[in-house]
Image (cartoon, helix red, strand yellow):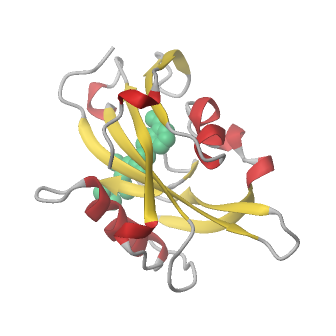
Amino acid sequence: MSPVSPYQVCVAFLTRVRADGRPEVLLGRKKTGLGSGNIVGLGGKIEPGENARDAIVREIEEESSLVVDPADLRQAGLVKFAFPYRENWSQDSTVFVGSRWTGEPAESDEVAPAWYPIDELPLDEMWDDAKYWLPTVLAGGRVLGDFRFGEDCRTVSEHELHDPHLLSAG
Ligand SMILES: CNc1ncnc2c1ncn2[C@@H]1O[C@H](COP(=O)(O)OP(=O)(O)OP(=O)(O)O)[C@@H](O)[C@H]1O
């Protein structure tokens, strides 16, 4: 199910626990580019010379102003997106989760960040794949998933969740 040379991206989900004990995740309304209008995690393309961890630290700061120590991010998996009807959208995304950072989230040109309760994720406004793996990752699990989008390039037409033990440590 893997597309031909997909580009490599990364995504992060920062979490906090409110004073009343309710866990929340930082998501954002994407303002530009692929998936604009969707509610997404922070993230973007891995640049030449970067590894996924370097890239996600840079993207988090560019998109939200938050500064994260790379060692404070847990690599929670890899999700592969294939768009057979729009090959150049196909991408592999390394997923990170973290709960330590410095600063306050601020809106950028790319994303308007906001906190969402983890038990009420806005899945209807996210990419269609998120419902298959994001709750698992936010519950402390790992994901290794393959998703194929249909002709509308919005709806998952096929997906496989593999054993996350196949992921390399990172
Ligand atoms: C298809 N289903 C999807 N489900 C969940 N998340 C998705 C996604 N498709 C893209 N993403 C995320 O979107 C970011 C890349 O998007 P992309 O437009 O390439 O990035 P962005 O414009 O920020 O790139 P640069 O800032 O130019 O690097 C990156 O976090 C990636 O994981």
Task: Mark yes or no: residue 168 visible.
Answer: yes
Nearer to the camera, 92 or 97: 97
Instruction: Return the x and y of residue 6 as percentages of the image width and height.
Output: 24, 32
Residue 166, picture quadrant: top left
Instruction: Return the x and y of residue 163 as percentages of the image width and height.
Output: 46, 23
Residue drawn at x 70%, y 38% as measured from the top left: 124
On screen, residue 102 above or below 140: below
- Find the residue positioned furthest to the bottom: 103
On screen, residue 138 above or below 117: above
On screen, residue 145 above or below 130: above
Side of 60 where 86 appears, left or right: left
Side of 80 where 7 appears, left or right: left
Instruction: Return the x and y of residue 41 as percentages of the image width and height.
Output: 52, 54
Residue drawn at x 18%, y 29% as measured from the top left: 5
Instruction: Return the x and y of residue 169 as percentages of the image width and height.
Output: 33, 44
Residue drawn at x 36%, y 18% as measured from the top left: 85
Nearer to the camera, 118 or 30: 118
Task: Mark yes or no: residue 34 visible.
Answer: no
Side of 51 where 114 appears, left or right: right
Nearer to the camera, 118 or 155: 118
